[in-house]
Amino acid sequence: MTENEDCIRKFIDGDAAFLKQLYAKNYFGVEAYILKNSGTKEQARDVFQHGLLVLYTLLKKEKLQISNFDNYLFTVCKNFWIKQSSQNSVTKLNTVTLVDESPDLASFHIEQLQWNLFKEKLESLKETCKTIIKLTLAKVSYAEISKKLKFSNENAARQKAFRCKTKLFKMIQADVRFKKLKNN
């Protein structure tokens, strides 16, 4: 049994020692992320609890392929915070709405699978392409990318980025999982 499989088993079984360790190991990273992104400690606690609940629900319903339990939990919490904070920025209502979260969990699960596919294909690219794509996603200018990666000029960086992104998109679209996710 791998370490991740052991973590998943203990998590689903509600192993108290494991849950305490999981909380100590992961909560403060989630809290730091939320505080850095205009959240409060109370919101961080709520997001972490919601992330645990979502992860538990997904693991009970399906056999997920998780390569790193801690990273997956952080990503669940991060995505939930992004979704929640974007909704709050549109409407600042202090109302409690009772709704069935099942459709939300389904769309969240699909987003997680899409993200996992993207990360997997990104990691299979050559190091230069990975770096360029990560820098462009971080909104680093082509001038800075050109300096950092020692391209002859900004235009060369832009062209290389275009080729790398095109290759990544083709790899994703060629994957069988993409077709299934696209149909959902």
Image: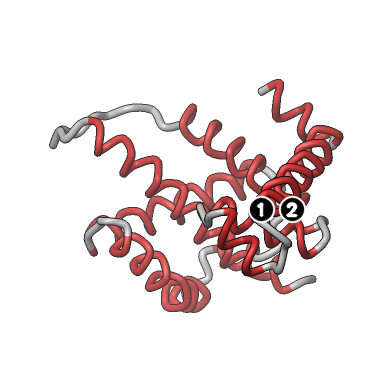
Q: What residue did someone put label 1 on?
A: 133
The foreground one among 117 and 163 is 163
Badge 1 density bin: few <14, some 14–19, many ≥20, Cα 10 Å? many
Residue at position x 84%, y 37% in the image: 175
Asked if the residues shown at circle 1 and circle 2 are in contact, with their CB atoms under 8 angstroms apart, the answer is: yes
Instruction: Quarter of the image for the N terminus: give it.
Output: bottom right
Q: At which x and y percent is residue 32?
A: 35, 69
Q: At which x and y percent is residue 97?
A: 23, 29
Residue at position x 22%, y 60% in the image: 40
- Extreme-top residue of the structure: 183
Identify whether 29 is placed above or below 103. Answer: below
Identify the element where label 2 is drawn: helix
Q: Amino acid at mark 2?
A: Leu
Q: At which x and y percent is residue 150?
A: 71, 68
How many callouts does the rendering have?
2
Q: Which mark is residue 122?
A: 2
Identify the element where label 1 is drawn: helix
Identify whether 86 is placed above or below 30. Answer: above
Residue at position x 76%, y 28% in the image: 180
The foreground one among 135 and 48 is 135
CA–CA distance between discs 1 and 2? Answer: 8 Å
Q: At which x and y percent is residue 128?
A: 76, 62
Q: Would residue 128 be visible to someone looking at this image?
A: yes
Determine the image quadrant of residue 176.
top right
Whichever of callouts 1 and 2 sits on the residue coming sooner in the sequence is 2
